[in-house]
Image (cartoon, grey):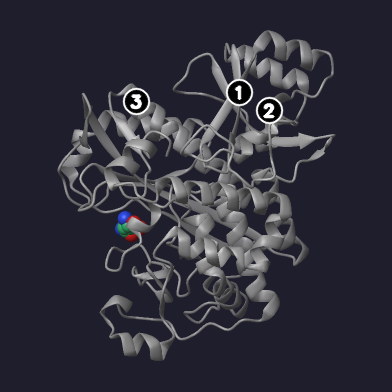
Amino acid sequence: MPDRSMPENASTILTRLREGKVRFVRVVWCDNGNVIRGKAIHIDALTRQLEGGETVAVGLSAAQQAIPVVADAVAPGSGLGPVGEVWLVPDWKTLQMLPYAPGQARALGEMVKDGQPWPWCSRQFLKRMVQRAGDRGLTIKAAFEPEFYLLKQRDQDIFPADNMPFAASLAMDLHQEVVMAIADALSAQGMAVEQYYPESGPGQQEISVRYTDALAAADQQVVYRETVKAIAHQHGLVASFVPKLFESCAGSGCHLHLSLWEGEQNLMPDGAGGLSETARSFTAGLLHHLPALMAITTPSPNSYRRLQPHSWSGAYAAWGMDNREAALRVPSNFSLPSPTHLELKTVDGAANPYLALGGAIAAGLDGIAQGYSLPEPVQQDPGSLSEEERGDRGIALLPQSLAESLAALETNSLLLDALGEPLAKTYLAVRRAELAAMADMTLEAEVELLRDRY
Ligand SMILES: NC(=O)CC[C@H](N)C(=O)O
């Protein structure tokens, strides 16, 4: 985001807020139920605090990090309870005027307790993983690629806002106003919008944004979800990132694009049409840890309705060049001989982007540390191979339920250690609570519950 260079200086902040005629600044975070939440501070209180030289902070119940998406009650076994306060401190470098909410601004918050980073804070978890890469001399660049549906609501009925197929230009005309408003609002908040097309589901959209540094990429995913939902609402529509809304229509992924850098040099290409050794080990680390990582990147019971073979969502533990059925796709380039990044498909918009990206970094770095080697690329649809061929080539079906990926995460010491005991314990408890509460839900009931939250 462009404001990252803004000095964290009280008078600069106040000047910007006054120029923007801001009355409320929302301090926003994404919790372990992957709901984006905010608490807003009035400009008068903020002015008092900033002019008095105080650090601006909003109090929050610690247990708020233990609330599953399904209920307003603390998940059992989370390690957090009704006693305990943490402080949400705005990162002023992320301050943005809200293009869709005049008079309001937003800064992303971090959780602090006793003047120290609070171990449950997901944004600080990602910072630790970025630092872990930095300790190896590596910088991670990333982009989330969210898909979402535009829906219309009539009384209790919710249905797709159009009936058009992939890239239908008529769908562009049908949604001209809302899409332009979304794209302009993303640009106004510092995102580099890259491409737009109607995706293959009826009413499904994809507006992609350019890669950036890891922390900014996760911040952008929060801002993206917020912006798309708010603007759709202003146009009388509901936008939803729920991974699977309709049984017979395409699911919505949020593929994660990753590249490794050393300074200004992209370390991904080998210059001879393939991936460098470092990139291969990083990819192998992702493949190795993927079943467990999916409890973070595809975290909802609903996520697994999307992850089916033949749906381009990456149901198999495989990698391939330009292979849209492999969980790890290495995309080719128009103008360069070698690939410049990789794409992880088993990610969706129900994920907390800080946890998802931080987990992916931890997994990939472990591949480098252990010197994992990458199997042969899979250049067919793995779902079309026989069981025997898949077995011979070591292509496993990835977890088909949250219960499976959670079981994998619970025994994955690399990811649990990376999260740290407090956050891991709470995260697992929240996922377990969601799994239990949604175990017998129909798709319709899931959608009713999740549609507005994701
Ligand atoms: N074009 C695509 O890659 C489609 C992706 C697919 N909708 C998914 O669920 O991941």
Q: Position of residue 444 (x, y in %)?
A: 27, 42
Q: Quadrant of the C terminus?
A: top left
Q: CA distance from mark 3 to mark 2?
A: 28 Å
Give the residue pinned by disc 3. 233
Q: Is residue 55 left or right of residue 328?
A: right
- Residue placed most toward the observer, 248 or 104: 248
Q: From the viewer's perspective, is the residue at label 2 or at label 1 nearer?
A: 2
99 versus 408 height, above or below: above
Give the residue pinned by disc 1. 39
Q: Residues within 10 Å of mark 3 (few under 14, many from 20)?
A: some
Give the residue pinned by disc 2. 60
Q: CA distance from mark 2 to mark 1?
A: 9 Å
Q: From the viewer's perspective, is the residue at label 1 or at label 3 nearer?
A: 1
Which kind of residue does numbered mark 3 sit on? His
Dot placed on the residue nearer the N-terminal end, 2 or 1: 1
Residue placed at 48% from the left, 53% from the top? 299
Snapshot quadrant of residue 293: bottom right
Residue placed at 43% from the left, 67% from the top? 399
Residue 68 shows in this picture: yes
Which kind of residue does numbered mark 2 sit on? Leu
113 versus 215 height, above or below: above
Q: Position of residue 420 (x, y in %)?
A: 72, 55
Q: Quadrant of ligand 1?
A: bottom left
Q: Residues within 10 Å of mark 1 (few under 14, many from 20)?
A: some
Which kind of residue does numbered mark 1 sit on? Lys
Mark 2 vs 1: CB contact within 8 A: yes
Q: Position of residue 452 (x, y in %)?
A: 38, 33
Residue 350 shows in this picture: no
Q: From the viewer's perspective, is the residue at label 3 or at label 2 nearer?
A: 2
249 versus 331 height, above or below: above
Disc 3 on helix, strand or loop? Answer: helix
Q: Quadrant of the N terminus?
A: top right
